[in-house]
Image (cartoon, rainbow, N blue to C red):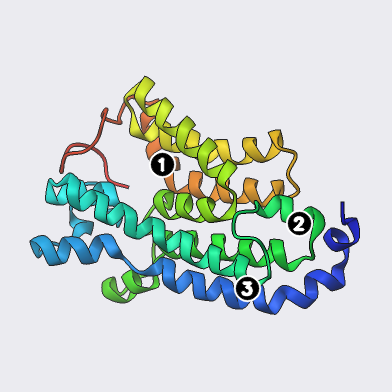
């Protein structure tokens, strides 16, 4: 284990400018509101006035009534996460298939910090889109970061991706509440890092908390019995 690489402040400081720059690039990419663009092109409608008001794939389904466009939006949002993280791993000389936590044990700070910045930038960009802020003339939450976060995890650490997707879908199948599966998926990320004893556990906790925060209000509504099962129809449930 390369302890010096993980603990040396000079190592982290030297790569910090690149990490900040990559966060900004990933944020811009994550901010592209594919769901808004798709709905506007297909129906001429504003996706934020339908369903939950979120700029995400499920709200594309609610607005267009089409599972096909849902898949297109989902894949587009996943690519927003995959692309900057995969590029960050290549940029820092890492193996694109090697989990970042594993690479951190044998490599320098760059193999961890830059991909982490890419994950965070993509998810924050989706959740708080600069493009949507310009369109709406206000800055606020635009999405929940699930598809983009899943895409980022796919490139960041396949083990995390599998754990989050499998457990999240299993909870949805058992409870028939999408919100329950989404929240459990967010919690699964740090739990997986803990089980794997990965050095990126603090980052996993941070990202899980970021995704949960986007779901908190409606999750509380779920606990109060206010969340509909399989909320897939426009006007079928709460906004947020």
Mark 2: few, some, or many residues within 10 Å (few <14, many ≥20)? many
Query: Left or right: where does residue 156 sit relative to residue 107?
Result: left
Q: Report the Cα–Cα distance between label 1 and label 3.
A: 38 Å
Seen at 78% across and 77% down, the residue is 14
- Which of 129 and 25 lies nearest the eye of the viewer? 25
Residue beneath disc 2 = 104
Question: Hey, which quadrant is residue 11 in on the image?
Answer: bottom right
Q: Earlier in the sequence, mark 1 or mark 3?
A: 3
Q: Is residue 198 above or below residue 82?
A: above
Q: Earlier in the sequence, mark 2 or mark 1?
A: 2
Q: Position of residue 178 (x, y in %)?
A: 34, 33
Seen at 60% across and 60% down, the residue is 96
Q: Earlier in the sequence, mark 3 or mark 2?
A: 3
Kindly check if marks 2 and 1 are in contact, taking CB atoms under 8 A apart as contact.
no
- Which of 217 and 18 lies nearest the eye of the viewer? 18
Seen at 18% across and 45% down, the residue is 67
Q: Which-is-in-front pick, marks 1 and 3?
A: 3
Q: Position of residue 72 (x, y in %)?
A: 25, 55
Residue 220 seen by the camera: no
> Which element type, helix, strand or loop, lies under badge 3?
helix
Q: Which mark is residue 49?
A: none
Q: Is residue 100 above or below residue 192?
A: below
Residue beneath disc 3 = 91
Q: Which-is-in-front pick, marks 2 and 1?
A: 2
Q: Position of residue 101 (x, y in %)?
A: 70, 51
> Which element type, helix, strand or loop, lies under badge 1?
helix
Kindly check if marks 3 and 2 are in contact, taking CB atoms under 8 A apart as contact.
no
Residue beneath disc 1 = 217
Q: Position of residue 240 (x, y in %)?
A: 32, 47
> Which element type, helix, strand or loop, lies under badge 2?
helix
């Amino acid at each position: 284990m390369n302890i010096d690489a993980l603990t040396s402040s000079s190592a982290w400081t030297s790569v910090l400018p690149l990490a900040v720059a990559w966060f900004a690039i990933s944020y811009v990419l994550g901010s592209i509101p594919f769901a808004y663009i798709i709905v506007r092109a297909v129906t001429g409608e504003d996706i934020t006035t339908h369903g939950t008001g979120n700029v995400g794939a499920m709200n594309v389904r609610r607005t267009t009534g089409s599972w096909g466009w849902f898949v297109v939006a989902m894949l587009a949002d996943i690519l927003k996460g995959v692309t900057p993280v995969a590029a960050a791993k290549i940029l820092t000389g890492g193996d694109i298939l090697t989990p970042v936590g594993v690479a951190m044990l044998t490599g320098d700070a760059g193999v961890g910090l830059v991909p982490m910045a890419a994950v965070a930038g993509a998810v924050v960009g989706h959740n708080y889109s600069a493009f949507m802020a310009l369109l709406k003339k206000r800055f606020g939450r635009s999405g929940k970061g699930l598809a983009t976060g899943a895409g980022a995890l796919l490139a960041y650490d396949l083990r995390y991706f599998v754990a989050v997707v499998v457990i999240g879908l299993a909870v949805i199948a058992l409870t028939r509440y999408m919100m329950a599966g989404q929240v459990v998926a967010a919690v699964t990320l740090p739990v997986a890092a803990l089980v794997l004893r990965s050095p990126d556990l603090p980052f996993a906790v941070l990202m899980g908390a970021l995704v949960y925060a986007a779901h908190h209000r409606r999750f509380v509504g779920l606990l109060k019995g206010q969340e509909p099962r399989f909320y897939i129809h426009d006007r079928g449930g709460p906004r947020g």
